[in-house]
């Protein structure tokens, strides 16, 4: 694998880590088929609707807990090792389910597997966003979601084939297959690359530039595109370190809007009704008139439509943008759910056919919109300093509402019957309104440039943005800058080298105090070990200067304090 470079390496890695979301999709679908099987019902003494709901939804409890914890874990041990441990825990949980001897061990296995699924569903989108270039970040994230739905579809067809077995193997084999797929992901996590953003954020610069060269420079670490990517990431890392502690409270204070948008996208992905179909499709079809194995068959056919619907976003996410996809999906899904409700209410001879039709339409438009985009959107709108933590909160919101829908659906199907689908149609309308008024477009925006999209510049670069070159007119040169290639070869040791602000706003601050090693000490202290008043302000050598004085003064004071402010900055 390490011989691969450029696009082949990027796509191979993306497809392989998609096994993580494949497991999530497989687990969603596998329970939907086996809970209607006669041998499963007999083995568990004909469980009630409430017991089935608990057995299915208890996985979300484990997933919710681990998705909260993994934000910190992913920052400490890295994205790749988090994927490894997530896969290992999932295999252990799947083994308990496969060889269960009763309801208690089944529920325990579901909880343990949930811990693994929660870790994988949180860290894989972060991993994907951090290795992807901005021009096709949407495509790669949508390919990842297709892996999720292929997992779901595979489980449904495995359930259907195994339903012909006349023993408990009819439900044990489908549960065992998820262990096999989890083990493959575990092995793969040993050979995939670590994300360059995590490597540079933890000062593994040599390994980081090699990885960037392999991903974006056709294997050449001195390729101009690789050097530019290296500079952008490292500059962003150094600037963010001046912000101090990367706690959840600081994230909430500085990036509340982004966090709420990220969490709402995952919340609506569940409240819009997908898991009524994913977890309980055979029960939905039985409610509409398809009985026994025919209900599983209809679920399998529906899953193929679901998989195919996830392919258009590969191209449309980076062509149309995120907003139009979410808005159009919410509108069609609301109509489809309303029609499902209507035909179940009138209960006419063609009701079974029409329910299948509108379930397929609903699944198709979910797969094109609210399926992939909520997994793409949160990691890309959150800054690197809090990306794993923010993604963990958004994924946690997914799991808490996933659990709520999974737990309540079988009960509500029995209690309010056809009205259940109107409830989810209402949430589709709500999601349309929220997206229209609050979600910005992020198509083609570099991850390091999201500050400009949201207007919440970090403390260290407030007023400056790589996408707004009008703030500072180049060049504000304080000392000669080495070449980018030399900077990369020297592993970005800033003892005597300039620190750069990203993109076209080339402001170079030459200060021995601002070394990558010194600034990185905040890893253990929670903030920079060098107080602003202890820093030695740089010697200013102004040759050709044209700056915005208020913004320049604010940056100077943020970093060095109020002493020795140059006249050119004070003016």
Image (cartoon, rainbow, N blue to C red):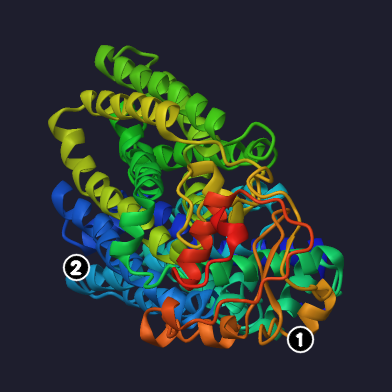
Side of 50 where 94 appears, left or right: right
**Which residue is at the front of the view, 54 or 485?**
485
Q: Is residue 221 visible?
A: no
Q: Residue at x 40, y 14 (%)?
A: 350
Which quadrant of the figure has residue 291? top left
Dot placed on the residue nearer the N-terminal end, 2 or 1: 2
Identity of the residue drawn at 24% across and 62% down: 61
Q: Nearer the viewer, mark 2 or mark 1?
A: 1
Mark 1 surroundings within 10 Å by alpha-carbon count, few (fewer than 14), some (14 through 19), many (20 or more) = few
> Is 388 or 271 nearer to us in this picture?
388
Q: Foreground: 130 or 173? A: 130
Quarter of the image with the N terminus is: bottom right
Rendering coords of residue 156 (x, y %): 47, 50
Give the CA separation, mark 2 to mark 1.
59 Å
Q: Is residue 195 above or below residue 232?
A: below
Q: Is residue 297 above or below residue 240?
A: above
Q: Is residue 475 visible?
A: yes
Q: Position of residue 368 (x, y in %)?
A: 56, 36
Check disc 2: other Cα within 10 Å, few if <14, some if 14-19, many if 20+.
some
Q: In terms of secondary structure, where does tag 2 sit?
A: helix
Mark 2 lies on residue: 103
Place of residue 408 in the rendered image (x, y in percent of width and height, measured from the top left): 19, 43
Q: Give the structural element (helix, strand or loop) at label 1.
A: loop
Mark sitting on residue 509: none
According to the image, label 1 marks what residue?
490
Q: Is residue 93 left or right of residue 129?
A: left
Residue at image coords 25%, 27%? 423
Left or right of 219, for residue 246? left
Q: Is residue 510 left or right of residue 269?
A: right
**What is the x, y in percent for residue 267?**
33, 44
């Amino acid at each position: 694998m390490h011989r691969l470079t450029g696009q082949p390496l990027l796509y191979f890695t993306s497809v392989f880590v998609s096994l993580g979301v494949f497991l999530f999709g497989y687990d969603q679908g596998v329970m939907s088929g086996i809970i209607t099987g006669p041998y499963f019902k007999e083995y568990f003494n004909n469980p009630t609707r409430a017991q089935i709901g608990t057995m299915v939804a208890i996985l979300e409890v484990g997933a919710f807990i681990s998705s909260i914890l993994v934000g910190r874990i992913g920052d400490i041990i890295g994205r790749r090792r988090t994927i490894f441990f997530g896969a290992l825990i999932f295999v252990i949980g799947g083994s308990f389910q496969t060889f269960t001897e009763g309801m208690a061990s089944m529920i325990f296995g579901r909880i343990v597997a949930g811990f693994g699924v929660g870790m994988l569903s949180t860290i894989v989108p972060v991993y994907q966003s951090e290795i992807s270039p901005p021009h096709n970040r949407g495509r790669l994230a949508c390919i990842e979601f297709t892996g999720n739905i292929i997992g779901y579809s595979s489980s449904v067809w495995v359930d259907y084939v195994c339903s012909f077995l006349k023993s408990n193997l009819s439900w044990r084999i489908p549960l065992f297959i998820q262990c096999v797929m989890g083990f493959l992901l575990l092995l793969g996590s040993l050979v995939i690359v670590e994300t360059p953003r995590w490597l540079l954020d933890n000062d593994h610069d040599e390994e980081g530039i090699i990885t960037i060269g392999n991903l974006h420079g056709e294997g050449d670490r001195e390729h101009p595109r690789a050097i530019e990517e290296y500079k952008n990431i490292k500059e962003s890392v150094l600037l963010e370190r001046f912000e101090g502690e990367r706690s959840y409270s600081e994230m909430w204070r500085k990036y509340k809007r982004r966090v709420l948008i990220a969490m709402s996208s995952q919340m609506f992905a569940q409240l819009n009704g997908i898991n009524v179909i994913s977890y309980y499709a055979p029960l939905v079809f039985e409610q509409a008139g398809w009985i026994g194995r025919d209900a599983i068959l209809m679920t399998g056919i529906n899953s193929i439509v679901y998989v195919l619907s996830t392919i258009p976003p590969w191209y449309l996410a980076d062509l149309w943008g995120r907003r139009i996809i979410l808005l159009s999906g919410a509108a069609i899904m609301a109509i489809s759910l309303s029609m499902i409700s209507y035909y179940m209410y009138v209960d006419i001879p063609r009701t079974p056919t029409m329910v299948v039709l509108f379930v397929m339409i609903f699944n198709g438009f979910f797969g094109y919109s609210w399926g992939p985009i909520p997994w793409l959107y949160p990691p890309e709108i959150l800054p690197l300093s809090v990306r794993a933590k923010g993604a963990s909160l958004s994924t946690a919101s997914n799991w808490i509402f996933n659990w709520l829908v999974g737990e309540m659906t079988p009960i509500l199907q029995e209690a309010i019957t056809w009205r259940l689908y109107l409830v989810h149609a209402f949430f589709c309308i709500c999601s349309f309104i929220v997206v229209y008024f609050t979600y910005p477009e992020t198509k083609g925006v570099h991850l390091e440039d999201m500050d400009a999209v949201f207007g919440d510049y970090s403390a260290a670069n407030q007023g400056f943005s790589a996408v707004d070159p009008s703030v500072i007119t180049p060049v504000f040169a304080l000392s000669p800058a080495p070449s980018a290639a030399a900077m990369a070869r020297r592993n970005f040791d800033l003892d005597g080298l300039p620190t750069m602000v990203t993109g076209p706003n080339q402001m170079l601050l030459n200060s021995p105090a601002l070394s990558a090693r010194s600034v990185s000490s905040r890893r253990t202290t929670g903030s920079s070990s060098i107080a602003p008043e202890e820093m030695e302000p740089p010697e200013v050598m102004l040759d050709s200067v044209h700056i915005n004085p208020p913004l320049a003064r604010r940056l100077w004071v943020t970093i060095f304090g109020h002493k020795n402010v140059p006249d050119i900055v004070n003016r």
